[in-house]
Image (cartoon, rainbow, N blue to C red):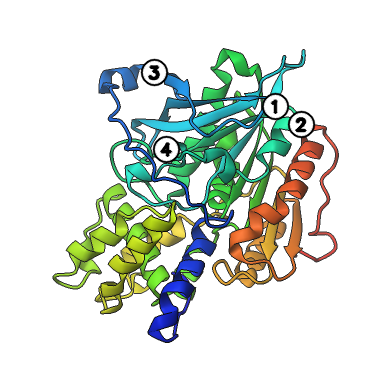
Amino acid sequence: MQFGICVHLDRLLALALALLFAWFSPFGLKPASAAPGYAQLDISQAELRKAKPGHVFHIHPQIGGAPANAKAFRIIYRSTNVKGEPVAVSGTVIYPAGPAPKEGRNIIAWAHYTTGVAGRCAPTLLPNLSGTIAGLEDMLSRGYVVVATDYEGLGAPGVHAYLVGLSEARSVIDSVRAARNLNGTHATNRFAVWGHSQGGHAALFTGEIAASYAPELKLVALATAAPATDLVELFKAQKGSIAGDSLTAMALLSWSRTYNLPLDSVLEEGAEARFEKVAESCIQSISQMLKLLKLAQPLKKAFLKTDPVQQPAWRDLMQQNSPGAVPIKVPVFIAQGTGDTTVKPQITLNFAKAMCASGTPVTLRLLKNASHSYAAEKSAYAAVLWLTDRFKGRPAPNDCANKRAG
């Protein structure tokens, strides 16, 4: 699903490492220590069933989450999975330390990029969480509450529902509800979503379901950077590389468990053990990615007996979890690097054109020569400024009208 690599062996490690980081971390190499092990949640099924979506079960200080003059808390809150069952999800809430304005604080929900699918891969378990949220200090300086979900299955027992749009969107929306349930935030019911890569995918699905899933909330806009949109095309474009095989392994493991779809329909006999080692890897530090590269080498020996894109059941899931089936009623900001080899610009442009056709106002910002890794960082200031204008009720620029996005 990513990066065609065909180089001499002595260059492979350095190149693949750089390329992996381009997909997984937009803020450069960080020699941060490994995340601590996540704690098993002491929340019973009875408690989950009794709680309303957004109910906060646990709250404690967020390590590495608060810049100067801000407060940050890691929370465990109630959300809903794709089967309609209550689940516990972790996240962080960050807000200015000073007094709230009389009218309260609006909310921006950050939706993060790929970090892995195992529970221990949650961003809120990182010691440098605040450095992974693009534009965080700008958002706080403008007075927003910033809430960042881990998504279902990260930071909690189980496997993350990776690129499962409905799950991601519910995790995002219920994190907003949870932020409003914390007394210190003084949060209003108005929110926007800002997401990169997988997080852009989550943001777009949030736009599709917010009105029906949480009618008490007011979604004002969505901002995305290099969003994952057409999953069939994304899987096809990155087929066969080490990094692509790794990401495919994560998606297949996640979907097999989320949808109870047997892996033996696509995996070669005897490949399951090495497949699972790769699929359950985290990719949040240098040491983790070096380990992943080593584990992924055997996957080059054809771990798939058939292309999932060509299998009806798996292809249906890709299409089902591609945004665009439901028109989005709020303005959408899309930043896309022209040098992105992960989410290729044409895929994003095609999606923007389809959004225009459905009536969604689209602001498209093309980042000259920018890679996938830096799409959020390079567009964060513009995205937050654009979102601020939407909160103020100013009309959104619409590139559909001048054919830039359409």
Q: Tell me the quarter of the image containing the C terminus.
A: bottom right
Question: Do residues under tags 1 and 2 come within 8 Å of each other at their CB atoms?
Answer: no
Residue 20 seen from this side: yes
Q: Nearer the viewer, mark 1 or mark 3?
A: 1
Q: Disc 4 designates what residue? A: 125
Measured as percent of width and height from the top left, residue 168 is found at 47, 43
Measure the alpha-carbon separation of dots 1 and 2. Answer: 10 Å
Give the SS element for disc 3.
loop
Q: Nearer the viewer, mark 4 or mark 1?
A: 4
Q: Residue 365 sits in which quadrant? A: bottom right
Measure the alpha-carbon separation of dots 4 and 1. Answer: 25 Å
User: Which badge, 1 or 2, is on the more N-terminal residue?
Assistant: 1
For the residue carrying disc 4, how many other residues have a C-alpha within 10 Å: few (<14), some (14-19), or many (20+)? many
Measured as percent of width and height from the top left, residue 319 is found at 45, 61
The type of residue carrying mark 3 is: Ala
The type of residue carrying mark 2 is: Arg
User: Which badge, 4 or 2, is on the more N-terminal residue?
Assistant: 4
The type of residue carrying mark 1 is: Asn
Q: Disc 1 designates what residue? A: 106
Image vertical order of residue 350 relative to residue 327, above or below: below
Q: Disc 3 designates what residue? A: 51
Q: In this rendering, would 51 be left or right of 218?
A: left
User: Which badge, 2 or 3, is on the more N-terminal residue?
Assistant: 3
Image vertical order of residue 176 relative to residue 405, above or below: above
Measured as percent of width and height from the top left, residue 74 is found at 47, 27
Q: Residue at x 27, y 50 (%)?
A: 257
Q: Residue at x 36, y 40 (%)?
A: 153
Q: Nearer the viewer, mark 1 or mark 2?
A: 2
Q: Residue at x 30, y 50 (%)?
A: 259
The type of residue carrying mark 4 is: Leu
